[in-house]
Amino acid sequence: MLESLKPQPQDKILQLIALYRDDPRADKIDLGVGVYKDATGLTPVMRAVKAAERQLWEIETTKTYTGLAGEPAFAAAMIAMILGEGFEGRAAAVATPGGTGAIRQALELIKLSAPGAKVWLSDPTWPNHPSIIKYLGMESAEYRYFDAATCGIDFAGLLEDLGRVSAGDVVLLHGCCHNPTGANLDMGQWAQVVDLLLARGAVPFVDLAYQGFGDGLQEDAAATRLIASSFPEVLIAASCSKNFGIYRERTGILIALADPTRKALVQGNLAFLNRQNYSFPPDHGARLVTMILADPALRADWQAELEEVRLNMLSLRQSLAHELRRATNSDRYDFVAHHRGMFSRLGLSEAQVMELRDRFGVYMVGDSRINIAGLNARTVPILAAAIAAVGG
Ligand code: LMR
């Protein structure tokens, strides 16, 4: 049986991890996978997470199963963090293994209720979006998003393409900190997108993996909140991997907003999907998140550390834009300071990306996406000089 398997394409982001690891050069720079690193290159366990783990070790008396949808307290805390108050009556939710698990369950839910629905993706988007959609045999389409000339948003192209969305189509939107570009809509643009998609009868599907990494915990939820309060039905896949730094704990949630009369039906279907795919979702990370969000002291400490992380990335952005100005004697990289989140797409060619890897040991995704958090005060000028050296 197994001899009939075909080799699968490697994930371009995850592939970089191995390539970087196997590079013997001591001065190599890893700007690949989206993992936060401090100035020493460490991905720390956040203080509040450590404190919650210590408490949990003391108070946890059983490891028996949780609910099939995860603990209701986790869902309530996440719904409040993402949407604020007032959504309980419309929000069905399941805990999932990370943000990817939430995306997968959302797509399965779409398939279950509207098998022919088309899913619109930004061009570009996180490569795992089209990959899972293709794996599930679903139909997809792309809307323009990134303007290669300015490394900003092609907003006219975006509106034109979303103007072709049909009623019942699903439109996947990055709630904040667009991956891979780092270019984000402002609230005026979000309002236009909301009006257009409402007029088209679309169902928004928000991927929210970086809340707190862009402009702040509340600010980064603003677009998702606008969407949630505007549309009768919304899917939201959220991840705790980055903002709680608990990548390997696989902690995420899928929230489905629906008419209150349909909440129980949707909840039952979400629990069913969990049962079919992996039964009970992972609990440890979700429990830590619930404890942190419920305890004022832990929550304040977590928010303070998240803010340190955000401001560190912001200051790296500013110094990289500054160093690139000097190294290239131009302002064409000023967009780096205006982008938000972990990533910026620099607009380099694939040949330049390869040259940066071969000559300078600088690892970035082939589309020239860099993880800002892979930099530090020492490597920022090195990167800027290397980019100038390859003609960027
Ligand atoms: C990324 O885009 O680098 C992260 O979301 C990690 C991943 O799983 O790809």
Image (cartoon, rainbow, N blue to C red):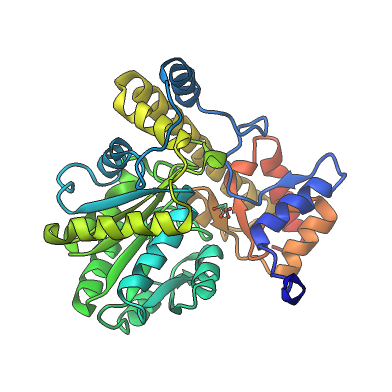
- Which of the two residues, 142 or 324, is positioned nearer the viewer here? 142
Is 326 placed above or below 126 here?
Answer: above
Q: Position of residue 51 (x, y in %)?
A: 46, 19
Residue 102 in the figure: left or right of residue 44:
left
The residue under the point 28% across, 39% down is 72
Is 297 placed above or below 373 here?
Answer: above
Q: Position of residue 201 (x, y in %)?
A: 22, 77
Residue 329 in the figure: left or right of residue 61:
right
Q: Residue furthest right?
A: 24
The residue under the point 35% across, 32% down is 290
Q: Position of residue 248 (x, y in %)?
A: 57, 40
Residue 314 in the figure: left or right of residue 375:
left
Position of the N terminus, as image quadrant, is bottom right
Position of the C terminus, as image quadrant, is bottom right
Q: How many marks?
A: 0
Residue 247: which quarter of the image? Answer: top right
